[in-house]
Amino acid sequence: MDAGTPIASHLDRTADAGHVVVNIGPSHPATHGTIRIVAELDGETVKRADVHCGYLHRGFEKEAEHHTYHKLIPYVDRLNYCSALNNGFAYAEAVERLLGIEITRRCVVLRTLLCEYNRIADHMTCVAASVMEMGAMTAFLYLMTVRDYIFEHLNHLTGARLTYSYVRIGGLARDLPDGWLTRLEEILVFAERYLERIHGLVDRNRIFIDRMRDVAVMTPGHALNWGFTGPTLRSTGLAVDLRKDAPYLAYPELDFEVPVGIKGDNYDRYYVRMCEIDESISMVRQCVQLLGDGPVSVDDPRVTLPDKDLVYTQIEALVHHFKLVSEGIVVPPGEIYVSHEGPNGELGFYLVSDGTSRPYKLHVRSPSFVHMGGMHTLLEGYQVADVVPTFGSMNMVGGECDR
Amino acid sequence: MTGRAPLTCEAIERELGSLVERSWQSFGMPVLELRADDLLPLVTALRDRFDFVLFLDVTAVDYPQRSPRFDLVYQLYSHRHNQRIRLKAGVPAERPVAPTLVGLYGSARYMEREVHEMYGIAFAGNEDLRPILLYEGFVGHPLRKDYPIEREQPMVPYRAG
């Protein structure tokens, strides 16, 4: 076996003699995320493409079967590391529903707020990277500035910039620190001002339109056939959004629109994401209004760790803490599929419990992986220079795709 | 939309009951258990008559002590009816083969490749079953319960020392 090629491409054998086969990635400055695209070119046109992923595979699902439910939280964060909170909340809901736990009102609202807040950061990452690859360095730096404010702000809350380990089964690790909501509003205002500038710089920019409009076009039927969900599916005009169709957390109480595109091209995917950021900002503000007092974690000794003060002073609390950490939470037997609207599409967790403290099976339905399965259909027939913007508009995240 | 059967679980059972062995509700989602041989006609009917046009997911679960050893688990979604459904089909260890669904859904292609490399279940008719997250030459199927978690198969040998 040639150590340089983990998987041989069929294009090496079947390409037309007059065509050139080029390899892009897996480590290429323009493929933000380790992915390899083998393309058969006729001049500048991509005739066929073969997309290879798996370069970031860490065996998440195998690890999941050997860890307790709480110890999995840091692993779950590392799926989509641009919006780790969304992953954690979907995973926690799967476990909580199997346990029959109802989380507190404050936790519901706070999780919703953080989901939308993290979605803003994720969409900004995607848009920033895509425009940067087309030379829009200013727009990139503007968006990265806002994103960095958000990450620093989440750092204040959770203690980490990207992989937060903030969710707990039955609640959250800690409540908001003082002044967090004040800073939140400052950042939202700042974000709105900068988003306005992005719209001004990019939306009607001739170069941007020429590169994005009518590139990688698809119909709703095509998107459904290839399993596309999230902004990618909505860019074709279908308003399919789990936050509306199967509302979870506090979404039934929020007032928001589902932005859709008109023809499912790269421009629509850019624009749908930009509109979703606006909706998310509005939803974060609504959540701040809904946020009442109360505990963030349920008072259920099966899942919730006792207060640290008590652990240090009372033997019962110490034993309780020890049992929860070393043995873990015992989840009743059963199976469940929970899906949330992740920033990239439907993020699903299929969990099978056999009644022990470790999952019998935990499968992640990751939108990025499914999107990569249909990516070649969006590359074929377009120019080789379109590969990078099209790939960027799908927002593949390596950690989520390869698990 | 006219002329389509209204979507209830009873309607699915009434029309396709002969293909379903058992059915129940799991946390609000209907689950149909069926023989792997009936997958193709059942899913075709679900797609064409009940609008389950979004093939969300396929994975497997390994029960080493049980016969059949594997369960294939499918998740389908109909955005028109806003309805989800889960299908479960047993696959025996002696003959780990199931019919492919790539003829019905493009998205099945990648996901079946993953199930194939992780569980060693082949999908008859899927012509592209190359490894996808692993690499060519990888020995065994890592998500089977009898594959030890400590086993290492580095593609590039570790440096000594």
Image (cartoon, coloured by chain):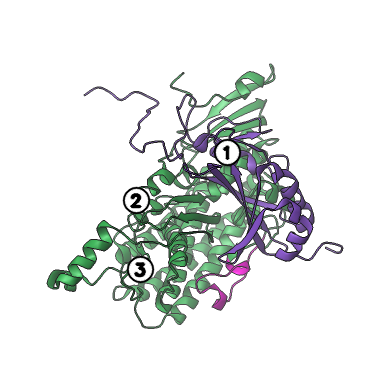
Tell me the residue at 40%/77% (across/down): A106
Which labelled disc corresponds to residue A311?
A: none
**Residue receiving disc 1:** B92
User: Which span is picked out in magenta?
Assistant: A243-260
Side (left or right) of A203 relative to A69: right
**Residue receiving disc 2:** A67
**Residue receiving disc 3:** A172
User: Which chain does the purple colour mark?
Assistant: B
Disc with the residue nearer the chain's start (3 vs 2): 2
| Mark whose residue sits in front, 1 or 3 | 1
Side (left or right) of A300 relative to B43: left
Q: Position of residue A82 (x, y in %)?
A: 43, 53
Q: Amino acid at mark 2?
A: His
Side (left or right) of A227 relative to A328: right
| CA separation in Å, label 1 and label 2 | 28 Å
Considering the image in quadrants, where does the C terminus of chain A appear? top left
Tell me the residue at 31%/76% (across/down): A179
Q: Is residue A256 magenta?
A: yes
User: Which chain does the green colour mark?
Assistant: A
Q: Looking at the image, which is closer to me, A348 or A299? A: A299
Q: Is residue B79 visible?
A: yes
Q: Chain of mark 3?
A: A
Discs 3 and 2 carry the same chain letter:
yes
Q: Secondary structure at mark 3?
A: strand
Q: Chain of mark 1?
A: B
